[in-house]
Structures are given as C-alpha cells and as structure tokens.
Amino acid sequence: QTVVTQEPSLTVSPGGTVTLTCASSRGVVSSDYHPNWFQQKPGQAPRALIYSTSNRHSWTPARFSGSLLGGKAALTVSGVQPEDEAEYFCLLYSGDGTWVFGGGTKLTVL
Amino acid sequence: QVQLVQSGAEVKKPGASVKVSCKASGYTFTSYYMHWVRQAPGQGLEWMGMLNPTDGSANYAQRFQGRVTMTRDTSTTTVYMELSSLGSEDTAVYYCGREMHGGYHDYWGQGTLVTVSS
C-alpha cells in the first residue's frame, strides 16, 4: 500500500513564497504519477488547483505552480495572499488503477 | 455548466449499508471517470475508488475491497457508491469527483455527510 507524505503544516507571511511537497513511499515521483493538487477550506469541498504535475485549471490563480522537485511533486505559491490560508492535498496515481492522497498540509498565512 | 449533485445526508446504524448518489450534468457522462473520496471529521481526504461510466468497471482501494460497490445508470447520468457493514469509523463526508483519463481531476460534488450511530 503506497503512502504519500506531505508536510503537516507550514507558515508563510503575506506576499511571501512557500513550497509544499508530496513524496511517495514507492520512490521518486515522476509525471507518471499524474500529481494533482487540491485546496480545501473549512466546511467546503476540495477545489482542484493543479493537474498532471504542472497544469493549472482555468480558475487557478497564476501564483500557484506545480513541479517535480527533488524526487517529489511540489506546489509553489508565490506572492501568498491571506485567502490562500487553507489545507492542501496532493493526489498521486499508484500505477495499478488506484490513487492515494497525501495527508495534507495546513498552510497558515501570518 | 458542469455539475455533480450528490444526495442528501444519511444517518445509519452500525452494520447497515448506505448508498450515495452523484448526478452528473453539463458534460458527456461517459468521457470522464468518477472517483469517490471521503473525509472523516477533522481528518484528511481518503481515496475510495473509481468507476468508468463507459463500461461500469471499477477499481477500489484495498481497504474497501469487498465492502464498497460503485455503479452507474447511464440513462440518468448518475453514479452510485454503496458501502456496507458500516461502523462508526465510516462517519464522514463522501465526495464524488470526475477525472478525464490521464490524471485530469477537476470538478467535485458538494459532499454527502454519512453518520453512523446507534
């Protein structure tokens, strides 16, 4: 059973830049894992931000970018806004028809 | 516009089953897989499984094998997720979400709260 690991929490100042990462117990994360990133605010459904590693949806602000970094999937937020305070989840394909979510990163803007 | 509208909240007793529906509209139903995800109170997202609406085939997370069944009705463009042998640990919000083959996850339903309590 694949385990996907994210930082439990991160804090960033408004206007700053922060990178969230997503690691797989199977090893190096590649584009074959089709990394997706989601944002979730309290009481709301998840909202898709990034698909297939680095592609933004039409509604995703340009300050959000996805990449592969050091063997992991990464989500970078540049010029953080107060409204970016939320929990962020990555989702990876396991290669056997199943997917696994990371445990989530709670991002605090302070 | 794309919409995934889920059925309403459910309260079930331990040992019972629950069937949650997800009505899709605004796109070609068979062009996107449908995934089911749940979130227990104060916890993260957990992937449960996915359904191919074209042929009805499904893949399930190992921990739900034998207890979950995902089906669809193409005439009403509705996908169903049935979970059996409910326990208190199954109390959660259940979401459906669509994916275009290749990892393009985008729209989600509003969620359905399932409460398991005696």
Image (spheres, coloured by chain):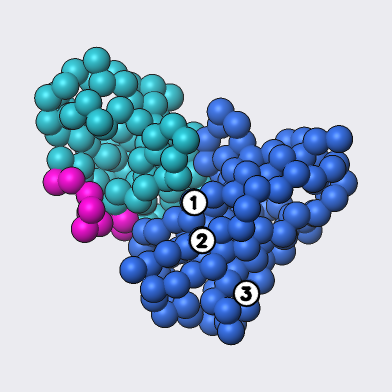
The tally of labels here is: 3
Question: Does A83 appear above or below A12?
Answer: below
- At label 3, the amino acid type is Arg
Q: For the magenta stretch, what is the residue range? A: A51-62
Rendered colour, chain A = cyan
Picture residue at 25% right of the left edge, 56% below the top: A57
- The residue identified by callout 1 is B110
Whether the magenta-drawn stretch holds residue B1 is answered as no
- CA distance for labels 3 and 1: 18 Å
Residue A101, percent from left and from top? 49, 44
Picture residue at 65% right of the left edge, 48% below the top: B9
Look at the numbered disc 1 and give the secondary structure of its residue.
loop
Residue B114, percent from left and from top? 68, 45
Relative to A19, A78 lies left or right: left
Q: Which chain carries label 3?
A: B
Can residue B90 be seen by looking at this rendering? no
Whether the magenta-drawn stretch holds residue A57 is answered as yes
Quadrant (top left/top right/bottom left/bottom right) for the N terminus of chain B: bottom left
Relative to B32, A64 lies left or right: left
From the rendered image, report the letter of the chain displayed in blue.
B
- At label 1, the amino acid type is Gln
Q: Say which label, 2 or 1, has the lower sequence index.
A: 2
Q: Which chain carries label 2?
A: B
**Mark whose residue sits in front, 2 or 3:** 2
- The residue identified by callout 3 is B72
